[in-house]
Amino acid sequence: MPNINAKTLTDFTAAIFEHSAVPALVAQQVAASLVQANLKGHDSHGVIRIIEYVEWVAKGSVNPHGRLTFVREQLCILPLDGEFGFGQVIGREAMNLGIAKAKQEGVCILKLKRSRHLGRVGEFMEMAADAGLVCFAFTNTHGGGVLVAPHGGCERWLSANPVGGGAPMPDGSSLVMDMSTCTIAEGKIKVALSKGEELPPRVIVNGHGEPSTSLEEYYSQPPGALLPMAEHKGFALSLFCEVMAGALTGAGCSKAGDQCVANGFMVFLLDPRSFCGPEFFYSELSELSRWVKSNRLTQGFDEILLPGEPETRTQDAREVSGAVIDDGTWKKICEIARARQVPIPHLDKPEASDNPHISKNNRTILRTVTGPGVHDSKTHIANPVG
């Protein structure tokens, strides 16, 4: 299981995309986002996605030249169309526009349709929090991409439908929430499959509606289905993702026979200056953090971590040790690279990251580059240290 220096992995990933008919600047942006996901510990949304992304490009399922376009702008509403471009590019540009609008108006409701896979939604929540905004997001997959059974059912009827949130903290860190409304994201099933692992109990049912931990049963015929998290509660959240990200954005809701798999995305962006004022806001969040962390610990816990803290600590460690790629995934990525005559990097002992997109000391810099399909030249700094 190789550990790979972040810059090496980013350059290698970008080269694979460039040799797959993806414009260089788009390839760099997508590569940076994927590697950041690995550094954050979300390998399900990291470079394992190269495998399906290059296939999507070959099939025409993703538009490498997709541009973000306005549908019909209103006072506090920002309706956008991603033209099926790479979500890591389209999503960042959409968030930059939404953040600017929220700063001007105090609030912005961003609604985006026809974006291909957005990747790690937490990246966009970090953008908002770093800009001093509070945000909450709903995501669906238009009408296709169904993987999840409704509560009480056993057939794939809904998508993973993640929800996300972000809030700035007084010390410069961020509260960050990014979670699917099912028991486990399908990307984590792909990682488990690549590692030859079984699933934990109560995550899926097989095609006959029986509890299962078998990856083979999940991908067999009839296929298995993921279950909603927290039973009826996760099911309810999932349906509201369909309402917000599917119906209201114009992307469409999960339904029979719809083969369109893209992301609908609705984000509420709120500026504390237009609500309670920053002094009260930061005072309350500081006290909330202290209060929560002061709780007596249950057995097996050394401390209470806030949402986003596990990712920050994982990133600190992996920027030194390198991103962790399982052997099965690395083998497939190398096969893709060889087919495109992209040199396989020599893997030495990992060093601290010198990635131009990913720097040290808990500061992740994702440069939003300009060029075909990328239209914002701002530099975004995630999780700044106070």
Image (tube, rainbow, N blue to C red):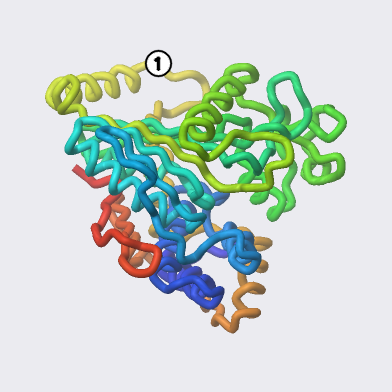
Q: Which of the two residues, 105 or 69, is positioned nearer the viewer here? A: 69
Return the x and y of residue 314 as percentages of the image width and height: 43, 47
Left or right of 362 on screen, residue 84: right
For the residue pair 89 and 177, the one nearer the viewer reads as 89
Query: In the figure, residue 158 lies in which quadrant?
Result: top right
The picture quadrant where one finds residue 78 is top left
Q: Is the N terminus in the top left, top right, bottom left or bottom right quadrant?
A: bottom right
Pinpoint residue 241: horizontal percent, then vertical percent.
52, 29
Determine the residue positioned at 72% across, 47% down.
197
Q: What number of labels is visible?
A: 1
State the residue at coordinates (52%, 31%). 247
Between 93 and 334, the one nearer to me in the picture: 93
Which image quadrant: the C terminus? top left
What amino acid is found at the position of numbered circle 1 in the picture?
Answer: Arg
Residue sitting at 20 percent across and 27 percent down? 272
- Does residue 350 lie above or below 224 as drawn? below
Q: Label 1: how many residues lie within 10 Å, few (<14), some (14-19) or many (20+)?
A: few
48 left or right, relative to 384: right
* Helix, strand or loop status at disc 1: loop
Which residue does the image show at 42% across and 64% down from the upper left? 6
- On the question of residue 167 being in view, the answer is no
Residue 157 position (above or below residue 94): above
Please determine whether, in this image, residue 209 is positioned above or below residue 319: above
Query: Is residue 76 in sight in this rendering?
Result: yes
Name the spot of residue 350 as percent of width and height, x first. 45, 67
Outermost residue, front side: 72
* Residue 204 point in image, percent of width and height: 73, 33
Judging by the rendered image, the residue that carries numbered circle 1 is 296
Q: In this view, does 279 lie to the left or right of 147?
A: left
